[in-house]
Image (cartoon, coloured by chain):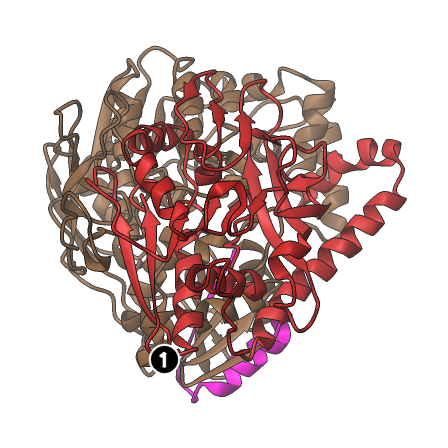
Chain colours: A red, B brown
């Protein structure tokens, strides 16, 4: 095990990094190193000519304008990315990157951006609906954490901020089910998309999600599932030695407990009271 | 009648022990819809200050410049920068018939800091003579949306500016330069005289695959040219995406600022008597030169000073007059404010986004802190999304120091430090987590030696909370110099 190494590609950090995405990389590096797995982080900026081989690819979030730039880059590099995932490279795509890697993405300007179709989702940001913003508590798909998590806690916490509505293709599996928050489209309770190794004809684990915060520091079970998926793949699962995660779970449960409590209180307040008092609450910041 | 009602509301709120910065204004507008325009119409020069960072300090400096000229400017309270807050400040200054009490030298001037999203609904009614745009950083994405969307809002708002009003903006901020390029109004710019001397320039990213060191300034937002979409390149950077920028295809580049500033002597931490010295700056450019010994600290303050002096030149105050007026100004509360608690010097620093945190980290050594107290809350006024703490390098602030973490999201700060690979080499001497502000403050103060320094960097509501606790315990603000 000690001789194993993990190479992480961070795609387009020069244009996609507005939601603390670097924190995800730091978490992966630290948790791999803690298991004596050497790491190597390669930043792939806009204009890169090729994608080097890697165990794990991470792509983060950006503004609309930068997503247009990324779509152009993916027209060139999307084929190489699919080849990597076909060979077993794991993928985590957050927010903007998640939208960019789907089958279709229509921007708020009504422009259809070219998409590589790596994730079975379609996103529409037209329609001028309100942005879906706020903290999220969700329950991660049991497929991802099957037997991996000793505490048995499958909850995931994060923050979402997106204008686009994302719909899963028929039969596609969500990354998580929303408990508090909006998720993919504020309608069907799904959050993100999950493809286990081997599914859809590609050998790599794939997670697409709107959750930043960043996602991985407060969700160590997800970080470990990604590392295990990146190192193992579907034919040779990898066991990672457990770490002392009490700080991670303390931050995690502090957030989830607070949000669940607020949501419960919220449900007890009738609609008319919300309409009457929410503007005042907003004004005094309470 | 409306004003009377508003004043009554203000008195009632005041009696209840609150600051009451919004309610009187709301009450007046409810019964008198034209109140804001009518009251503002009685003002002389009106200066609005808008931007992500430095609004309160810049507005405070501009007020100092006006006061030195004999004016008694009307200003809104720090943070009360929505429409109602400005309304309230005007109501307070008017008589019961809605007339502003004039000063001896004629109509009074107004200096108002304005919230980023409120500019559009305030500007037409106020009809300002000068609009100062300090900078535009990514901030509170949960509330404002993307920075590009804010630029579009401001552009639309500036279209409604009165004939002859002047836009004063930071020449080094490409977002503002791109905004100004599309706005047809007289302009005046401010910026650094040259590359800042207190920081190294990171190597430029090359084409192709870059490793860690070549990615450029990780704090900076990526800025692309509005015309061609190419990433801007920089000769030098100062703070985040601010610097000497240009579009590789030549669509836009930094202009030489009309008013320039450089820090010629940095600030120093408190001496045995608890007195600190602010930075000395040299102002220059086409409107004249001057040197000023300030009560302020850091490069962000230098920008605020240049912005205020540039605004002064737009209303007839020379650079020399501006420099004299701001000497000794120690800044608004909570923005690098020194307080004496139990024999220790506590410096309060407002942090609210990646850039202000990164600048705080840079200030670290000049503060001479023995203990670092970090406060992170996620109330709406703080910004509910705290992911920005991951974008600033924090090693310089916490390495080899006693660290106390507080606030509703102190657990996130704890993880931020745990997962910081840079800090692993020189970890904090100790890390304590106390979500309750009062408990954390006690521990931080007790951990510093007598006469020592506690650097307390906190988000808005955490900063207000810490300050209130210190005031209740009889702490007094120690004026620098």
Classify mark 1: helix, strand or loop.
loop
Asked if residue A113 can be seen in this view, the reply is: yes
Task: Give the number of callouts.
Answer: 1
| The one of B430 and A196 positioned closer to us in this rendering | A196
* Residue A60 highlighted magenta (yes or no): no
Q: Residue A242, image x and y in percent?
A: 55, 78
Q: Is residue B185 above or below residue A217?
A: above
Residue at coordinates 60% horizontally, 76% vertically from top-left? A246
* Left or right position of B129 against B267: right
| The one of B473 and A10 positioned closer to us in this rendering | A10
| Residue at mark 1 | A2
Asked if residue B375 can be seen in this view, the reply is: no
Where, quadrant-wise, is the N terminus of chain A in this rendering?
Answer: bottom left
Q: How crowded is mark 1: few (under 14 residues within 10 Å), some or many (20 or more)?
A: few
Q: In which chain is the residue bearing label 1?
A: A
Q: Which residue lies furthest to the bottom in this view?
A: B449
Q: Which residue lies furthest to the front in this view?
A: A235
Q: In this view, does B416 lie above or below B77?
A: below
| The one of A141 and B98 positioned closer to us in this rendering | A141
Q: Residues in magenta?
A: B434-459
Q: Residue A39, image x and y in percent?
A: 32, 68
Q: Residue A283, image x and y in percent?
A: 68, 39
* Residue B440 highlighted magenta (yes or no): yes
Q: Is residue B325 above or below residue B89?
A: below
Residue at coordinates 33% horizontally, 43% vertically from top-left? B221
Q: Residue A227, image x and y in percent?
A: 46, 63
């Amino acid at each position: 095990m000690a001789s194993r190494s993990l190479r992480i590609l961070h795609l387009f950090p020069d244009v996609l990094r507005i939601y603390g995405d670097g924190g995800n990389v730091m978490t992966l590096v630290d948790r791999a190193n803690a298991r004596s797995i050497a790491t190597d982080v390669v930043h792939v900026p806009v204009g890169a000519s090729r994608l080097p081989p890697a165990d794990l690819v991470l792509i983060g979030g950006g503004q609309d304008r930068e997503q247009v730039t990324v779509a152009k880059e993916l027209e060139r590099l999307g084929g190489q990315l699919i080849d990597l995932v076909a060979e077993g490279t794991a993928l985590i795509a957050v927010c903007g990157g998640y939208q960019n890697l789907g089958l279709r993405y229509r921007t708020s300007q009504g422009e259809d951006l070219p998409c590589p179709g790596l994730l079975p989702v379609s996103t529409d940001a037209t329609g001028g609906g309100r942005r879906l913003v706020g903290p999220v508590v969700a329950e991660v798909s049991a497929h991802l954490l099957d037997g991996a998590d000793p505490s048995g806690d499958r909850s995931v916490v994060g923050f979402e901020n997106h204008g686009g509505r994302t719909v899963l293709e028929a039969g596609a599996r969500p990354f998580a089910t929303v408990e508090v928050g909006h998720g993919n489209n504020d309608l069907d309770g799904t959050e993100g998309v999950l493809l286990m190794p081997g599914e859809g004809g590609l050998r790599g684990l794939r997670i697409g999600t709107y959750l930043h915060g960043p996602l991985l520091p407060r969700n160590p079970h997800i970080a470990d599932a990604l590392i295990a998926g990146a190192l193992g793949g579907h034919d040779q699962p990898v066991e990672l030695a457990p770490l002392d995660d009490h700080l991670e779970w303390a931050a995690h449960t502090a957030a989830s407990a607070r949000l669940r409590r607020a949501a419960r209180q919220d449900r007890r307040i009738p609609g008319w009271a919300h309409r009457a008092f929410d503007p005042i609450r907003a004004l005094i910041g309470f | 009648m409306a004003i009377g009602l508003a004043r009554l509301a203000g008195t009632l709120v005041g009696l209840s022990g609150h600051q009451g910065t919004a309610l009187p204004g709301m009450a007046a507008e409810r019964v008198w819809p034209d109140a804001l325009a009518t009251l503002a119409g009685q003002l002389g020069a009106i200066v609005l200050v808008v931007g992500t960072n430095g609004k309160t300090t810049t507005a405070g400096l501009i007020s100092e410049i006006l006061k030195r000229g004999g004016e008694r400017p009307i200003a809104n309270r720090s943070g009360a920068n929505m429409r109602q807050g400005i309304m309230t400040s005007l109501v307070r200054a008017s008589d019961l018939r809605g007339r502003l009490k004039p000063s001896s030298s004629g109509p009074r001037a107004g200096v108002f800091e304005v919230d980023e999203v409120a500019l559009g609904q305030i500007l037409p009614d106020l009809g300002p003579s000068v609009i100062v745009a300090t900078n535009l950083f990514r901030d509170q994405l949960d509330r404002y949306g993307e920075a590009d969307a804010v630029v579009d809002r401001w552009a639309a708002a500036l279209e409604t500016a009165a004939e002859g009003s002047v836009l004063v903006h930071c020449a080094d901020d490409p977002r503002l330069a791109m905004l100004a390029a599309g706005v047809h109004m007289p302009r005046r710019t401010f910026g650094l005289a040259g590359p800042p001397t207190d920081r190294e320039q990171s190597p430029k990213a090359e084409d192709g695959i870059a490793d860690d060191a070549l990615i450029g300034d990780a704090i900076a937002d990526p800025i692309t040219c509005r015309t061609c979409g190419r990433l801007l390149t920089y000769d030098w950077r100062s703070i985040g995406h601010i610097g000497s920028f240009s579009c590789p295809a030549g669509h836009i580049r930094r202009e030489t600022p009309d008013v320039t500033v450089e820090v010629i002597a940095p600030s120093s931490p408190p001496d045995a008597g608890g007195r600190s010295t602010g930075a000395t700056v040299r102002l220059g450019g086409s409107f004249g030169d001057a040197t000023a010994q300030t009560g302020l600290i850091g490069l962000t303050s230098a920008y605020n000073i240049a912005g205020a002096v540039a605004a002064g030149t737009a209303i007839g105050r020379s650079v020399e007059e501006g420099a004299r007026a701001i000497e000794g100004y120690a800044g608004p509360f909570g923005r690098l404010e020194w307080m004496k608690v139990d024999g220790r010097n506590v410096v309060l620093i407002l942090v609210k986004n990646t850039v202000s945190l990164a600048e705080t980290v840079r200030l670290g050594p000049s503060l001479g802190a023995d203990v670092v107290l970090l406060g992170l809350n996620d109330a709406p006024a703080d910004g509910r999304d705290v992911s920005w703490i991951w974008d600033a390098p924090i090693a310089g602030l916490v390495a080899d120091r006693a660290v106390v973490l507080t606030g509703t999201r102190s657990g996130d700060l704890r993880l931020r430090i745990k997962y910081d690979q840079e800090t692993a080499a020189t970890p904090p001497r100790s890390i304590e987590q106390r979500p309750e502000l009062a408990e954390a403050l006690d521990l931080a103060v007790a951990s510093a030696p007598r006469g020592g320094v506690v650097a307390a960097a906190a988000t808005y509501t955490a900063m207000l909370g810490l300050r209130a606790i210190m005031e209740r315990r009889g702490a007094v603000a120690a004026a620098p110099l």
